[in-house]
Amino acid sequence: MTPPSPAGYPVRLAAARAALADLDLRIGTPGLAAAAALPGLLAEVDQHAAALRDLLGDGERAPSPIGLAGYADGLRDMASGLGWHLPQSDRVDWARAPWLLVRLVAVCQLAVPPSV
């Protein structure tokens, strides 16, 4: 039997999925497309994804959408306070993408279920 969800969970889940979909559209999909052509970037994204699974999940399965969205939001808030803003994907030199951008691409990679 599945335990009951806390009050407000469906709303938080929907908001998290919407935030992740927006992030994926803006930076995840372009970043993963670049990673498919740049083995070094792909390795970085995979390393970040593994670190996020350890940090936010059980190390094997992807963290929940709520956890991923909250983590991404926190990163962006912290970076915004330092003057950083999410760049337009067509202006990114993906071969030299900064740590924060690669981390956000990894969040998107984990948020999108793998195709079977």
Image: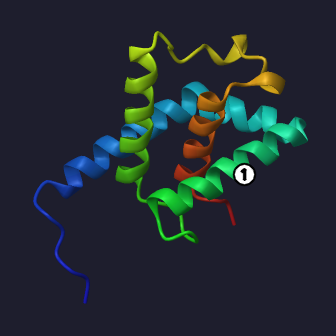
Q: Residue at x 66, y 34 (%)?
A: 102
Task: Give the amino acid at mark 1.
Answer: Asp
Question: Is 23 located above or below residue 46 in the figure?
Answer: above
x then y, percent, for residue 90:
71, 14
Q: Quadrant of residue 36?
A: top right
Q: Secondary structure at mark 1?
A: helix
Depth check, front residue: 27 or 98: 98
Depth check, front residue: 86 or 20: 86
Q: Which residue reaches farthest left? A: 7
Q: Which residue reaches farthest front? A: 82
Residue 94 shown left or right of residue 39 in the figure: left
Q: Residue at x 40, y 25 (%)?
A: 78
Q: Quadrant of the N terminus?
A: bottom left
Instruction: Judge the density around disc 1: few (<14), some (14-19), many (≥20) Cα neighbours within 10 Å.
Output: some
Q: Residue at x 55, y 60 (%)?
A: 53
x then y, percent, for residue 91:
71, 10
Residue to which mark 1 is pinned: 46
Question: Is 6 located above or below residue 81 in the figure?
Answer: below
Depth check, front residue: 110 or 18: 110
Q: Quadrant of residue 33?
A: top right
x then y, percent, for residue 35:
80, 38
